[in-house]
Image (cartoon, helix red, strand yellow):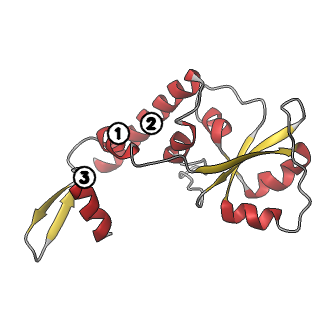
Amino acid sequence: VSRAARKLNELGIIRKKGSSTRIEYFYDGSIRSLFLNMKRFMGNPVVKEIKLSAKHYKEVSKIGVLAGESALAKVSLLAEPEHQVFGLSSKEWKVFSDGREIEYVENDEEECIVLEIYKHKLFLDDKGNLHPLLAYLSLMNHYDERIHKELEVLMMKFEEDLDDERNK
């Protein structure tokens, strides 16, 4: 933690105060400005996107979480995507696919599900949905402007929730 704090201080994102015996790091800006400052250091957590036959739906829906456009549609006004999107960590994908016959789909006409493989464990919010920051990072480079509008609404709600927690 101290190495990360020192690096954030060097980058001017957080500030340090105190003496050599007691050092405190703090951020006195808004959650939005913190996120915007940090966004340039964050990348897409999705390492791979694959399409699987719809016959895998039951198995994947038991271990995966709604991700990508499906996750955003669940918490916004965005319509459900044509193919439901689930997320698994790369570790979960390895366990799921090991020794199992996986039927991949090449074109969009076939019934399928989309599986996003994340670099790390998928973090969820307190309602069991994909965490707003993960949803944002996984879709921030999407081509559809409707998605960008809903991501902005999602982030504003997230900021409000954080501010409410901070003010308790």
Reading the image, the residue beneath label 1 is 36
Residue 155, numbered circle: 2
Which of labels 2 and 3 is toward the front? Answer: 3
Between the residue at mark 2 and the residue at mark 3, the CA separation in whole angstroms equals 23 Å
Q: Is residue 67 above or below residue 16?
A: above
Could you say where residue 38 lies in the image, as x and y percent from the top left? Answer: 36, 47
On screen, residue 156 above or below 56: above
> Mark 3: which secondary structure?
loop
State the separation of the CA atoms marked 1 and 2. 11 Å
Is label 2 in contact with label 3 (beta carbons under 8 Å)? no
Asked whether, in this view, residue 131 is left or right of residue 62, the answer is: left
**In the displayed image of the protein, which residue is found farthest to the bottom?**
21
Q: How many marks?
A: 3
* Label pair 1/2, CB-CB below 8 angstroms: no
Q: Which amino acid type is marked by label 1? A: Leu
Q: Which residue lies under the disc numbered 3?
A: 11
